Image: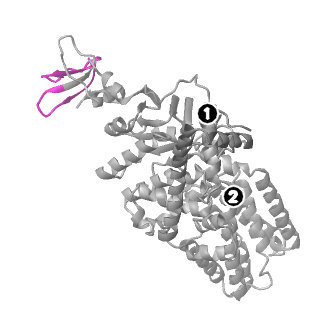
Amino acid sequence: MTPSSVHPPGDVLDRYVGAALAATPYPSVVALAAIDEADAVRVELHLTTCPVCRSAVDVRARRQATPRLDQGWWAIEAALVAPPLPRLERVLRWAQMPADVARLLVSTPALRRGWYVAMTVALVFGISAADPTRPDANELFFLILAPLIPLAGVALAYGRGADPAYEVAAATPIWGLRLVLVRAVAVVGTSVAAIALAALLSPAVGDHAAAWLLPALGLSAASLALMTWWPPRRSAWVVASVWVAGVVVANGATDDRYAAFGLAAQLGYLVLLLVASAVVAVRSRRFSTGWVA
Amino acid sequence: MSARLTSPSSPWARPSSGPVVVHADRLGVVLGGRTVLDDVSLWASGGVVAVLGPNGAGKSTLLRCLATLVEPATGTVHLDGADVAAPMARIEARARLGYVPQRPGFTGSARVFDAVDVLAVCKGLAPEARRRGEVLRVLSAVGVADRIGDRVKTLSGGMLRRVAVAQALLGPPGLLLADEPSADLDPEQRVHLRHLLTDLGRSATVIVSTHHLDEAAVIGDTVVVLDAGRVVWTGPPDALTATAVGRVWWSVEAPPPSAELRLAWRTPGGRWRCLGTPPPDAALADPTAEDAYLLLVGPSGRH
C-alpha cells in the first residue's frame, strides 16, 4: 500500500487520535468511536509524507488529551484529599460488597441513628409495656409489632418525605429498582437482626420466637409490590393496617390466639412473599421510569 | 430570538456529548386541579435560556417537566429527539441532565463530599477513581473544596445551594436545569455562579429559572417570560426593552385610572412613571428592561 496524497477527513483524524490515546495509560473515561483498521493504516501511511496532517494530528492529540489529563489529575487529588470512607462503608467493602452498592446502602436515609433508636425504643416498649402478669399477651404483642418494624424501614428508606435528596436523585438514571432494593434489603436486614436479638433476649418471648420472621418478610415484600402503584408511605400504611386487622380478626375468629402465626398462616406469608416478589420483578420498571408527579 | 435557538425544522441529532437539544411542545400541566402550565413551548440547543417570571408563574414546574419528573397532561418533551414519555427515553435523558431543584435536600449528617458522591453513583459515573475525581472537580468549581469533609448540616444556605449546583455539574451534563440557583447566594457568589453557568452554556444547554430580571438579562442568551403558566414573551434580553418603547411616559400629576393605564408609581422626584398606552400629549420616557417586564407580567394599578 502506498501513501495516499488525499488528506484524511477531520473526523477520521479525530478517531485516529482518539484510538491512539485510548491505548495509552491515561485514564480512559471517554467512549471513543473506534477507527476502522484499514483507515488507521491509511492515515499512518499518509502521515509519513504529509507534514500538514502531522500537525493536525498533533493539535488534535493535545486537545483530546487535555481533558483526560485533567480527569487523571482530579482523580489523584481526590485520592489525596477526599475524606475517608465512613466506617460502615469500609466494613461493607471489606466484606467484598461492590463500591457503588456500598455507597448507596450507606446513604439510605432510614439507616441513621434516629432509625436505630426508634427501632430499639419500639421493641423495648413493645416487650415491656404489656401486662407483666400475662406473658402470653406480651409475646403476642411482640409478634404483631415485630413485622411492622422492617415494614416501616422500607417506607422510610425511599421516596418523597423519607429521602431529602429524593427529587434530585429521581432525575438520575439509577433512581429506581436498584436503589429501592439495596435500601430495602439494608433496612429489612438490620431490623430483622435487631428483632431476632430482642426475641432471643426477651423473657416475654417464648415458643414463638421466630414466628414473626416470615410475616415480616412477606409484609415488606407486599409493601414493595404496592410501591409500584402507590407512594411508599401509603403502601406501608395499607399493608400495616391489613396486617393488624388480619391478626385481630384471626384472633377473634378462632380459639387459638396464635392463629395468625400457625403453620397454615406461615405458608400464607411465604406465598405472599413469593407473589409480592414476582410482582416487584414484573413491575420493576415502574421504579425506574415512573414520574415523580 | 438568539442564534442559540434553532428552528423546529432542524433535523434531530442524538449526540452522546455536547448540548442536549430540548424541545417542549405545547406543554400543559395540571397539579391539584390547577392548571400550572398552559400551552408552553420551548426550543433550545446550547447556550443559556433564562426562564423569567413572577412567583407562581410555573417556572419550577416547567423545569421539573424538562427534568422528566412531572408528566405533562398535554404536549410533549423531546430531549435529543427522544420523546421522554417513553420510559427508556426518560432513563437515557436522565443520564445526561443535571438538575438543581428549588429546594435542595441533603441528609444533614452526610459529609459534603459523600453527598455529591452518592449522586455521582446514581448518575452511573465509573470507575470509582474517576468518579471521586469528578466529585472533587465539581466541588472545586463551586468553591466548596475546602469544606468537603464537613457535615452538610454545618453549611449555610448559600453553601448548600452551591453543593446542589455541584451535584448538577457532575458528568458534566449536556443539559443543566437550575431552578433559582442563585437564591441564598451573596453577590460575589452570584457573579461566580453566573460565570459558571455561562461557561457551561458553551458546551451544554443550560435552562435557568429566576425572578430576577437583571440576572436573566446577564446570563441568558434567550429569555423566556412566563406568566400564569403561559409564555408571554421569548427573545434575546436586548430585545426585551424594545417591547416597551412608546409605552412608558412621565406624568406630573397622579394619572387617573383608565383602561389605557397599565401601571403607575410615584418616583422619588415626585413625578409619576406610567406604563401602558400613553395619551397623545404624554412625555415619553426611555424604557428600561424592568418597564418591559412589568408591562408583560406586572399587576395593574397605581402604587
Numbered disc 2: secondary structure: helix
Q: As drawn, is B145 to the left or to the right of B122? A: left
- Residue at 79% of width from left, 59% of height from top? A277
Crowdedness near tag 1: few (<14), some (14–19) or many (≥20) residues, C-alpha within 10 Å: few
Query: Which residue is label 2 attached to?
Result: A178
In the image, residue B24 sits, relative to residue B277, either above or below, namely below
Of the pair B257 and B201, the residue shown nearer to us = B201
Numbered disc 1: secondary structure: loop
Q: Are marks 1 and 2 on the same chain?
A: yes
Q: Could you tell me if the residues under marks 1 and 2 are in contact, i.e. CB atoms within 8 Å?
A: no
Output the chain of dot 2. A
Residue range of the region highlighted in magenta in the rendering: B246-272
Of the pair B242 and A159, the residue shown nearer to us = B242
Q: Is residue B138 magenta?
A: no
Q: In which quadrant of the rendered image does the C terminus of chain A lie?
A: top right
The type of residue carrying mark 1 is His
